[in-house]
Image: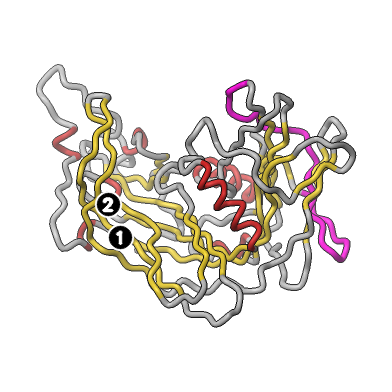
Amino acid sequence: MVRHARLILVYFFLVGCVDPIEFVVNNNEPHLVVEGYISDKSYNETLLYPSDGRYFTIKLSLTSDVTNVRSVPVSGASVDLIDDLGAQRDYVETGNGMYALVDPDFRAVAGRKYKLKISLAGDDVYESAWESLPGIAADPISEIDFDEVEKQVYKYQADEKIIQTVKGITGFIQLPEHNSEEPVYYRWDLIPHWIFIAPLPPAFSPTKKCWATSPFYLSDYVLQEDYRGGYRKMLFFVETDQNERIYEDFSLLIRQKVLSREYYFFLKEMQEQNPDALRSDKPPFNLQTNLTALENKKKVIGYFAVVSEKARRWYFNRWDLSYPVADKLLSSCKGPPPFVPPPGCMSCLEYTNGVASNTEPAWWRE
């Protein structure tokens, strides 16, 4: 159990199991925001992706549009998952509004229905609608490839936002063909990791080589309403010039989820209202929800979903390109006195573009 608790805390800090969504509503009364899902892949099964593993979590917060501040985490709640056979599983509070279902073998099962019940410390009780796995299960991700491209992006230069043309790659997956009468509703999440080598420590220093990740790099999810399959779907763009993430190995865990129609359009509307919702102080509002307050008319925001999930890990580095990419880290760490090397030059643990550890992940390729 101690090992499981440590893994939960590390995972929450690095990438989280739910998306950091916040909402602004047209009322000065705080509203409960609920974020989370379950899938047909247990914690133990997600270890085989390979990855650090993912427990199912629910995030609870309160938000209001009049304070113009980000939402406040909710503590002291009771969160339960109930199925249509009457079985109940309790979530454990882990801090900062997060509640985890600490069962390494639990997964959603086809033919079962599930609902979420939330009881707050002030006696308010909320429930979701009954949800079940979509009729079409997620297919394995069979192929990941990339195209070398040039793209116009926004850059900041002397505090001014300008447009520059940069080199990079666009990553694709191949969607399988299907003959179902209904479309398949997809969502893809991208979880990056990369090796960072500090330029100045000696070769055998324990702070020379680190493995880094960031919840803010490639953090936007991708949606697709697919009617036939059989084509390449673009998922991401990675800049190549002066991007230290690809100097050594860069890895993406690509999680592919098949959603219900209702959950898909909830996510799609959220993206359409504000494409930068994951980083904005003014996120979308008044979205459709499958949650209700049982004993009063208090409004609740968010969605509890049951999804089908597959994932695949992909590796890439600058040597996979048809053109050279120079490693300029060492030159950026040297200069005449009184030059002070920037963070990350003397120790990889001081790297500023992500959370770094000098312990190699157990799943990292040899």
Q: Name the residue type under label 1.
A: Phe
User: Position of 254 compared to 196: left or right?
Assistant: right
Which residue has dot 1 on it? Answer: 316
Residue 91 falls within the magenta-colored stretch: no
178 shown above or below 203 = below
Residue closest to the eye, 286 or 236: 286
Tell me the element at label 1: strand
Q: From this viewpoint, is residue 46 visible?
A: yes
**Residue at (78%, 68%) from the top-left corner?**
112
Residue at the extreme left of the image, as rendered: 336
**Residue at (14%, 36%) from the top-left corner?**
331
Whole-percent x, y for residue 7 in the image: 58, 48
Residues shaded magenta: 67-90
> Are circles 1 and 2 on residues that touch, CB within 8 Å?
yes
Q: Name the residue type under label 2.
A: Ile
Residue 81 falls within the magenta-colored stretch: yes
Which residue has dot 2 on it? Answer: 246
Q: From this viewpoint, is residue 7 visible?
A: no
Tell me the element at label 2: helix
Whole-percent x, y for residue 319 in the image: 20, 60
181 shown above or below 318 = below
User: Position of 308 compared to 344: left or right?
Assistant: right
Residue closest to the eye, 241 or 26: 26
